Image (cartoon, rainbow, N blue to C red):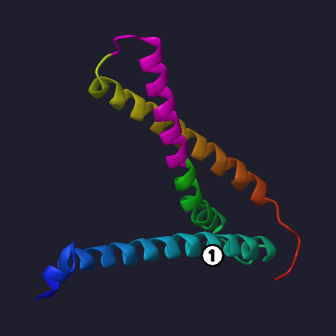
Amino acid sequence: MDIEARHPIGYRGLTYVFLVIITFAVIGISAIATTVLGAIAIRQIRRSNGRLYGLRLALLEALFYPALVVDCGVCGMLSVLILGLITTLWPHPAPLWAIEPLMIAFELILVVVADVLVYKWLRRKLKRPSGGTV
């Protein structure tokens, strides 16, 4: 009896599942590490009294993955809300292939504008030196 017969998804399937799990673990660890290291860099730059620079990049590093998660959640909730409203308000709405591109474009524009505004607001807040030493 070979290994293909003993496992319901087969040896090749188990290998792919294992590779997917490892890939998602590496992505998750790198996302957490990037966010934490960006926050540490922001703290060090603010306490350096002008000796260190790179606040914009550190802020972008610290915000990228959390903003990505929030943006995906917002887009998902808006999709459900918009499709629910369209199907409730109009008894015979346009086909979904006609509505979805407009909905996705609206969501992307909304999310990008919100991200830029949050980034600019935080950059302005963090420009003030904290006055501490390293």
Q: Residue at x 41, y 33 (%)?
A: 105
| Residue highlighted by disc 1 | 37
Q: Main secondary structure of the magenta part?
A: helix
Mark 1 Cα within 10 Å, few/some/many (few <14, many 20+)?
Answer: some
Q: Position of residue 58 (x, y in %)?
A: 62, 68
Q: Residue at x 71, y 53 (%)?
A: 122
Q: Position of residue 27 (x, y in %)?
A: 45, 71
Q: Position of residue 20 (x, y in %)?
A: 34, 72
Q: Amino acid at mark 1?
A: Leu
Q: Position of residue 113 (x, y in %)?
A: 56, 39
Please tell me whether residue 45 is drawn above or below residue 116 in the rendered image: below
Nearer to us in this view, 87 or 8: 8
Q: Is residue 78 magenta?
A: yes
Nearer to us in this view, 100 or 92: 92
What range of the chain is rendered magenta?
71-93
Please tell me whether residue 12 is drawn above or below residue 101 in the rendered image: below
| Residue at the right extreme, as displayed | 131
Give the quarter of the figure containing the C terminus: bottom right
Nearer to us in this view, 73 or 102: 73
Q: Residue at x 60, y 69 (%)?
A: 35
Nearer to us in this view, 24 or 30: 24
Please tell me whether residue 37 is drawn above or below residue 101 in the rendered image: below
Q: Is residue 87 magenta?
A: yes
Is 74 placed left or right of 5 in the picture? right
